[in-house]
Structures are given as structure tokens and as C-alpha cells.
């Protein structure tokens, strides 16, 4: 038994005992069982034996940690005490970032000292260059650079004679492999999948006789390495991709690859160059493919960009009894398909880009076969512009049972296809036919059909009843049932029982027609959508009566959970006449309605479940409602309504029902005539989010805002006439305040220091604010952005260091400061800061050593548009720093040149450094 097989057996034994379990998010991965993990953590916390003393730390052998987005120097400090490390293995946490950044000090200073290292992984780190010293790790067995940005592996990699696993998967910048790779005679696994810039294999791959994994073999033009090298790799298993086959001139080399002997190979991809032109040798390519016949155990076969006129007979050979997946893609010269019907285990078949194929006929079924495609589950045809006919006559024989298990059929981009598709598919659940303008889709004996998508076809014909009990969702645009862009719908010869569709030979030109067509069918539908038909008219009729269940979602364009009425794209009666909306409607969208002046009063009472309302580009709208908003409304968005002046008519508000409002989200964007939101607080008493942006005539926010005890976020931007906040300030529940572009605003809200829930505060472009709140800001503030010179000075005088919970600080336009923090004003920063942004300080010359010395938590520093800034703190930047961005600071740029700049040592430990938008290691 091979060591890998023994290891696999041991692992599956652990799985059977619930030590590990299969990941719920990725079926190919396993995670430790929660109970085992909890037990391990409990023991580690409670038992002093597990606590790492300095002596035990020196003896640590294995380091496995969760890879973060930025892994800095401090993360690895503990490893400086370790002497005999054998495993360095970062792992990606679920939902983590694909690309991470790591401190340069780990690569150049720390890892080279671990001479006994066996396992080294730097997977997913943004590394462009490897230190030469890493090849001194002569005991390495496992080396993983997957997803890095390395451009080459140094030749000295070939001195790692103990190496068994080398992974450079998805190294998209990798240009070549070491020329002496053949020296790695113990190599068992070589994964280069996704390293698409590699052009050839190095000489002597055949000497890697123990290779079990070889993801790709690349045939180079005039390469010294040929397919013959595969003949000696007798243990290759799993998946193999052979690319660059257009460069082969000798078909005998293909035969000598001996693929038919590689019994452990499960998946084979054969790929030629994507451009099929006159320079390609058609006969040679036919011979090569004929010679590349794999072992009969193959399960998956893909042939891409093959330039021959025919496929070899072996592709349809029934002796390939394990083949489950077959893909024939972009084989543009092929004019026929092989006989595939006898592949008894075939489950998934894709035929794509065969641009010269005209007819699919009896040849694919095999004469005399009573049950062709007996296991096929999915069948996809795509981008076959010359295909004219699918001859189904042989499978219409009552003695032939074809496609008995097919549950998904799609035909996409076959512009000349006409005639008919197979009519009896007893297991079909999904039928997708799009971009076939000459094809009338006939829905026949599909008893299990539950998803139908028809897009840009000549028409749809139903000749037998559809069992509409299967249809839980009818969508005529971009969803489960699509009849989209068709010239007509034809339902013929349908019995008039309760489960069939009525006879109709007319195109759908109105909802009345649609209602008739659906009256006796699709009675379980809960969702209906109609999109991009040329003629849609809304009339008063009982269009929703055909449905057994109340329709809750109606989409007339793009949003599947909304009703969207867009007069710019459809012919509609004016919205105020629309009085037949379903009572259960929860979401309504109105766009580009020139006739809409306000919502109809009937909506306020009839649509008692309406929760979301979106109105955009309705230039006749002057107010939303005369008296009240729908009581159930929770979210209201109003965008680009040029004449909106108020939400409700103020003089009638007090006469309205006193029922409490449920409105939680109010967002108003670019309504230039809006003067007021509401003079009373009744409409806003449940409000949580208030956003008002680009409303130049808005003069005030509602009185009594301090009593809205649910308010959490307030955004007021570009409202230049807003002069003040109402007396009483804001409620203590508020967590975020953002105020900007309010030129006449003279003061911040009252009692700012009492806002104990406030976490984020942003003040920008409010030049009329002349005074700082005398009591200051609440000390639990976590994020502060100040873009005003006067406010900046007042903030320093009050004492910025008092904000002892502050994590993010953005300072803009501190014009007169020569240092930051400002030494002349004895400015101190809170040591809780993790993010600091300094922007637009034309006189700033240096960063203060004293001011930065206590910033032990700082992780992000961005300095922008400080043209005479020339030095950083004398004793360096904090070791906690993970990101440094420098823009528009020309005097610093030359000093931070990689390895050569005089200030390079100050930033070399930072994982990500970008100067003028360019990553410094690129």
C-alpha cells in the first residue's frame, strides 16, 4: 500500500469517528468537529501543561495559523524564539480574502533560519520575488506558492532534492519553471494549473518517475520536451491537462505518450490553440487526437479547440464504461458528432462552439440501440450558428427509449436551428432555449417540467397540457419561466380541463391576454414577472383572479421582488389610474413616470402589506401622499424627482389617522425643490436611517428629532441652505452622523457630549461652523473625520487624546501645521488609533517622533497631498503597521525605493506599501 493510500485510510477512519466532518460550504474540504475543537480549546485554557514557556517555545515544531488580509511583523514575533520549526502553514479562514500581504521580514529574516523546515506554504500572499536564501532549506518536502505573484522559480530550487510536492497553481505571473527541474527526482506532485503564462515544459520531465500528480503538460513550439516524456510517468493519476497540442508535428509522439496505459487517470483535457486558421495541419491534428486515446477508466474528457474535421471513433466507444462527463468545445472544423449514445455512464454532455456542424442525426444514437443516452442527466448545446436540424426521427420509434434520465436541456446561440427538439423527455425539469430566432419551441411531453426559459426565439407552442402543479414561480423575464423577446405564443390543441392553458394563436399584447392564457393554468403561481415586450398595456380588469394564491410579487422589468413601472420603456396608462395592484404586494418601484403627481389615495388603505417604495425620475411628482403614507411602509427611496417639495401635504397631516408610522428608512437623493421633510414628527417616529443628499433648497430638518428614539444614522450632504439643527439636538440612540457640504450650517447639534451611542462622526465642508461644542465629543467615539481648519484647531485645544476609544481618525486641511501631531500645539493622539489618514496639508514637513511613539495599535496609515513632507518619525513607524499609502508626497518617494532608499528600513516590515497607487514590490 502506498503511503498516500495509507494516509487516506487513516484520515477516513478519523472522519468515521467524527473527529473531522465534511465542510458544509465546500464539499471537497473537511473541518474539525465542533465538539473536538471546543474540547481542545478548553484543555488549552485550563491545563497549565499546555502553556508555552520559553523552553517549550524553543522546541515547537509546527506552526499553523489563520491567514489574514495583512500579516505583519508582530504576528510572527513568537517565532523568533523557535529553533526547530518543521511546518509553516497558513490556512485561509472561511470567507477570507483570496489575496493577502505578508511582512518582508518573514521572507528575508525569519524563514531562512529554519533549516529543518519540511513544510512551507506561502499560498495566497502577494509575493513577487522569492529570496535566494529559501533554497537553503534543503529538507523541504512540501512547497506551496499557489496564488502568489512570483514571476519565476530560481534555478536553485532544483537543489531541494527532498522535495516531494511543488504547488504553483494560479501563479498568473509565473513565466517559466526551472530548467533543471529533472533533478527533483523525489517529486511526487507537481501542480501548475492556472499558471497560464508557462509556454513549455522543461527538459527531462520524464525523469520524474515518481510523479503521481501532473496537472498540466504544455507542448511548446519547437520544445525540447515532447509528449514522449509522459510515457515514463507510469504513476500519474487524477487530472491531466495537455495543452499546446497545435505545436505537435509528429503524431508518433502522441502514441508514445502511452495514455492508454495510465489506468489511474480520471480526467483528461486535450487543448489546442484557440485560433483555428489555415496554418493548422488538419490531418496532423486528427492523427494526434486519434493517438491520444486514454485508458478505459477515464471519467471526464474535454476536447478544446481541436482543428480536425472529424472526431476519432474511440470518443464514442462503449468500452469507456466509466465516462461520466464529456465536453467538446470550440472544435470549429468538425461537421459531425461521434456516436455517443452508447456511453452507458455518460451523465453530462456539453457541445459548444462547433460552428460548422449543420445536422445532428442518427449517427449519435447508434443504429439498433434501444436505450441511447441511458444515463444522461444534463445536455447543453451552445454557440453553434450553422446548426439547422436536430433529427429526432430515430428516437420517436416506440421501441426506442432515449434520454430517460435527462433533467436539464439547454440550447443557446444556435441562430439557424429550426424544426423541433425531442418531444418525449419524461424526466426533464429544466428547459432553456435562448437566441434561436428560427426555432418555435414546442413544449410537449415533459411531465416534470418546473423551469422554462425562452429568450429570443420565434415562438412557443404547447400541443399537450402542462401539469402546472409543478410551476411554483412564473416569471416572464429573467427567472424561472421566461418568455422574453418572442414574437408570439401559441397554445394549440389543449383540452379545456382545469389544468391546461386556453387556446390562443395571438401574440401577448396586454395583461388581459396574459390573464386569459394563465386563467386555467399555473394556479399555484406566487410570483409573476413580465419584461421587455414591445406591447404591454395595463387595464382595469381582474388580471390576478386566475391565481389560486395571492400574488405577492409582480415585476414588470428587472427586479424579481418588486413591481416596476417604467413609462420610458413601455406603453402604460398613467399610474394614478392603476387601481388593481394586488393587496399582498410588498414592494413597489416606479421609474420615469411623467404623469405621476402623487400616489393614489386608494393605495394608502388597500395595500396594507406594502413595505418598500422606490420612486425615481418622476418629474411631475410634487408630494408623495396627500394625507399619510401607507401604514405598513418601512422603506422609502426618492431619487431624482425634480419638482418634489414635500412628502405629505402639511396642512392635512394633522387631520390624518393617528396610527403610528412604521417608516424605518428614508433616503432622498437630488430633489432640488425639496423644502422640508415634515413639520411634525409623526411620520418619522420609527425612523432608523435618514439620508438627505443634494437637496439645495432644504432649510431645516424636522423639529423634535431628538425624540425619535430609534434613529441610528443621519446623513446630510450638499444641502447648502440648511442653517441649524432643531432645539434639543439628536436622540441618544444615534450611532453615526455624517454632515458635509452644508455651507450655512453654523453649529453642530446640541448636547453632542451626551450621545453615548455615537460611534462615527464626519464633518466636512461646513465653513460657517465657528464654534466647537464646549463639552466636546463623547469619549466613546470610534471614528472621526474632520475637514475644516477651524474645527481642527478647536479639536486639538479641547484635547484629541481624550477620545480614548478612537480607532479611525481622518484629518484634512491642517494648513499651518509643520509637524503631525502638531508639536507647537502639544498635540497628542489617542493610543487606541488603528487607522490614521492625513490629507491635504501643504506645510507639513515631518511626522513627529513623540506623537507616533505611543501608537502601538496603528495598522493603517495614509498620507496624501503633502508636497513638502520629507521625513518620518526618527525611531521608525510602529511595528503594528500593516498598510502604508503615500500619494502626492514627491520628497518621500525616492527615499522609500525598495532596498536602496535611505528610509527603506523604516517601511520594510510593512506588508503592503503603495506609493502613488503602485504596490512597492511590483
Image: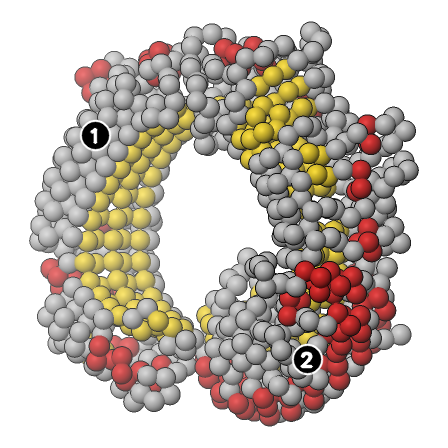
In the foreground, 600 or 326: 326
Q: Nearer the viewer, mark 1 or mark 2?
A: 2
Disc 2 is placed on an element classified as loop
Residue under label 1: 642
Q: Residue at x 61, y 74 (%)?
A: 221
Left or right, 339 with reference to 385:
right
Residue 5 position by quadrant: bottom right
Report if residue 55 is visible in the image: no
Residue 337 appears at what percent x and percent y?
Answer: 74, 46
For the C terminus, the image quarter is bottom left
Q: Is residue 9 left or right of residue 352?
A: right
- Which element is circle 1 on? loop
In 3D space, how far apart are the residues under numbered discs 1 and 2 (Cα atoms)?
Answer: 70 Å
Measured from the top left, where is residue 816 in percent x and y? 10, 70
Q: Is residue 760 left or right of residue 699?
A: right
Q: Which mark is residue 84?
A: none
Residue positioned 84% across, 63% down in the render: 295
- Whether 324 is drawn above or below 687: the answer is below
The image shows residue 579 at horizontal and vertical percentages of 40, 11
Task: Decide: few, some or many residues near mark 1? Use Cα within 10 Å; few <14, some 14-19, many ≥20.
Answer: some
Q: Looking at the figure, which quarter contains the N terminus?
A: bottom right
In the picture of the structure, the residue carrying the numbered disc 2 is 225
| Residue visible at 10% across and 44% down in the picture | 744
Q: Quadrant of residue 206?
A: bottom right
Q: Quadrant of residue 718?
A: top left
Q: Residue at x 21, y 58 (%)?
A: 786
Upstream in sequence: badge 1 or badge 2: 2
Observer-nearest of 652 and 388: 388
Q: State the scheme by which the image is colored.
A: secondary structure
Residue 708: x %, y % from top left: 30, 35
Front in this rendered view, residue 219 or 249: 249
Amino acid at each position: 500500500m502506498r503511503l498516500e493510500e495509507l494516509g487516506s485510510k487513516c484520515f477516513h477512519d478519523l472522519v468515521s469517528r467524527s473527529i473531522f466532518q465534511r465542510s458544509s460550504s465546500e464539499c471537497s474540504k473537511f473541518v474539525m468537529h465542533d465538539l473536538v475543537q471546543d474540547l481542545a480549546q478548553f484543555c488549552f485554557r485550563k491545563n497549565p501543561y499546555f502553556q508555552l514557556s520559553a523552553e517549550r517555545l524553543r522546541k515547537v515544531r509546527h506552526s499553523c495559523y489563520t491567514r489574514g488580509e495583512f500579516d505583519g511583523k508582530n504576528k510572527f514575533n513568537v517565532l523568533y524564539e523557535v529553533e526547530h520549526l518543521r511546518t509553516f502553514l497558513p490556512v485561509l479562514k472561511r470567507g477570507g480574502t483570496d489575496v493577502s500581504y505578508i511582512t518582508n521580514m518573514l521572507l528575508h529574516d525569519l524563514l531562512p533560519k529554519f533549516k529543518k523546515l519540511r513544510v512551507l506554504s506561502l499560498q495566497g500572499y502577494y509575493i513577487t520575488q522569492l529570496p535566494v536564501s529559501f533554497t537553503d532549506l534543503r529538507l523541504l518536502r512540501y512547497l506551496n506558492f499557489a496564488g502568489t505573484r512570483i514571476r519565476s522559480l530560481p534555478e536553485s530550487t532544483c537543489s531541494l532534492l527532498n522535495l516531494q510536492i511543488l504547488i504553483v497553481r494560479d501563479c498568473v505571473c509565473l513565466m517559466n519553471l526551472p530548467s533543471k527541474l529533472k533533478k527533483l527526482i523525489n517529486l511526487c506532485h507537481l501542480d501548475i494549473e492556472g499558471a497560464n503564462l508557462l509556454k513549455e515544459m522543461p527538459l527531462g520531465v520524464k525523469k520524474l518517475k515518481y510523479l503521481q500528480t501532473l496537472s498540466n503538460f504544455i507542448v511548446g513550439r519547437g520544445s525540447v520536451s515532447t509528449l514522449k516524456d509522459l510515457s515514463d510517468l507510469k504513476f500519474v493519476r487524477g487530472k491531466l491537462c495537455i495543452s499546446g497540442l497545435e505545436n505537435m508535428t509528429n503524431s508518433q509522439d502522441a502514441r508514445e505518450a502511452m495514455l492508454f496505459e495510465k489506468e489511474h487517470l480520471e480526467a483528461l483535457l486535450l487543448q489546442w490553440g484557440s485560433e483555428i486558421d489555415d496554418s493548422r495541419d488538419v490531418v496532423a491534428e486528427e492523427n494526434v487526437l486519434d493517438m491520444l486515446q486514454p485508458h478505459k477508466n477515464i471519467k471526464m474528457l474535454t476536447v478544446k479547440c481541436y482543428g480536425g474535421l472529424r472526431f476519432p471513433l474511440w470518443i464514442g466507444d462503449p468500452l469507456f464504461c466509466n465516462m461520466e462527463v464529456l465536453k467538446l468545445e470550440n472544435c470549429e472544423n468538425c461537421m459531425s458528432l461521434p456516436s455517443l449514445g452508447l456511453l452507458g455512464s455518460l451523465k453530462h454532455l456539453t457541445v459548444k462552439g462547433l460552428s460548422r456542424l449543420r445536422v445532428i442525426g442518427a449517427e449519435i444514437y447508434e443504429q439498433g440501440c434501444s436505450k441511447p443516452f441511458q444515463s444522461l442527466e444534463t445536455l447543453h448545446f451552445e454557440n453553434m450558428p450553422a446548426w439547422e436540424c436536430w433529427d429526432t426521427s430515430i428516437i420517436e420509434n416506440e421501441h426506442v427509449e432515449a434520454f430517460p434520465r435527462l433533467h436539464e436541456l439547454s440550447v443557446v446561440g444556435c441562430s439557424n436551428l429550426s424544426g423541433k427538439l425531442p418531444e418525449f423527455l419524461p424526466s426533464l425539469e429544466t428547459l432553456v432555449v435562448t437566441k434561436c430566432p428560427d426555432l418555435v419551441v414546442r413544449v410537449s411531453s415533459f411531465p416534470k417540467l418546473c423551469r422554462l426559459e425562452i429568450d429570443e426565439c420565434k415562438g412557443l407552442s404547447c400541443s399537450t397540457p402542462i401539469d402546472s402543479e409543478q410551476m411554483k414561480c412564473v416569471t416572464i423575464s429573467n427567472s424561472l419561466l421566461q418568455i422574453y423577446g418572442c414574437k408570439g405564443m401559441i397554445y394549440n390543441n389543449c383540452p379545456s380541463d382545469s389544468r391546461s392553458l386556453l387556446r390562443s394563436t395571438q401574440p401577448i399584447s396586454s395583461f388581459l391576454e396574459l390573464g386569459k392564457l394563465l386563467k386555467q393554468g399555473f394556479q399555484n403561481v406566487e410570483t409573476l414577472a413580465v419584461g421587455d415586450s414591445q406591447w404591454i398595456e395595463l387595464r382595469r380588469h381582474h388580471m390576478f383572479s386566475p391565481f389560486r394564491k395571492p400574488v405577492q410579487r409582480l415585476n414588470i422589468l428587472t427586479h424579481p421582488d418588486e413591481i416596476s413601472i417604467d413609462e420610458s420603456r413601455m406603453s402604460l396608462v398613467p399610474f394614478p389610474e392603476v387601481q388593481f395592484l394586488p393587496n399582498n404586494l410588498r414592494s413597489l418601484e416606479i421609474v420615469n413616470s411623467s404623469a405621476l403627481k402623487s400616489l393614489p389615495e386608494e393605495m394608502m388603505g388597500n395595500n396594507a402589506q406594502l413595505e418598500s417604495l422606490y420612486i425615481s425620475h418622476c418629474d411631475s411628482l410634487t408630494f408623495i401622499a396627500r394625507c399619510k403614507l401607507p401604514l405598513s411602509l418601512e422603506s422609502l427611496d426618492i431619487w431624482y424627482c425634480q419638482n418634489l417639495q414635500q412628502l405629505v401635504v402639511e396642512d392635512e397631516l394633522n387631520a390624518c389617522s393617528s396610527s403610528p408610522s412604521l417608516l424605518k428608512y428614508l433616503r432622498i437623493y437630488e430633489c432640488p425643490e425639496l423644502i422640508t421633510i415634515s413639520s411634525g414628527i409623526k411620520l418619522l417616529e420609527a425612523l432608523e436611517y435618514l439620508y438627505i443628499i443634494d437637496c439645495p433648497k432644504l432649510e431645516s430638518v424636522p423639529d423634535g428629532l431628538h425624540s425619535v428614539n430609534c434613529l441610528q444614522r443621519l446623513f446630510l450632504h450638499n444641502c447648502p441652505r440648511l442653517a441649524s439643527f432643531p432645539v434639543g439636538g439628536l436622540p441618544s440612540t444615534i450611532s453615526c452622523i455624517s454632515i458635509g457640504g452644508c455651507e450655512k450650517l453654523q453649529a453642530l447639534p446640541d448636547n453632542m457630549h451626551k450621545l453615548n451611542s455615537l460611534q462615527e462622526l464626519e464633518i466636512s465642508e461646513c465653513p460657517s461652523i465657528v464654534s466647537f461644542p464646549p463639552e466636546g465629543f463623547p469619549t466613546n467615539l470610534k471614528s472621526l473625520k474632520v475637514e475644516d481648519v477651524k474645527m481642527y484647531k478647536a479639536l486639538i485645544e479641547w484635547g484629541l487624546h481624550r477620545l480614548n476609544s478612537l480607532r479611525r481618525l481622518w484629518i484634512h486641511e491642517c494648513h499651518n501645521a509643520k509637524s503631525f501631531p502638531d508639536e507647537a500645539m502639544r498635540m497628542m493622539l489617542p493610543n487606541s488609533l488603528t487607522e490614521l489618514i492625513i490629507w491635504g496639508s501643504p506645510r507639513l514637513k515631518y511626522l513627529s517622533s513623540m506623537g507616533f511613539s505611543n501608537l502601538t495599535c496603528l495598522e493603517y496609515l495614509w498620507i496624501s497631498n503633502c508636497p513638502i513632507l520629507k521625513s518620518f518619525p526618527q525611531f521608525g513607524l510602529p511595528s503594528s503597521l500593516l498598510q502604508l499609502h503615500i500619494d502626492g508626497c514627491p520628497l518621500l518617494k525616492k527615499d522609500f525605493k525598495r532596498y536602496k532608499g535611505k528610509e527603506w528600513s523604516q517601511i520594510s516590515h510593512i506588508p503592503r506599501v503603495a506609493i502613488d497607487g503602485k504596490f512597492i514590490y511590483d
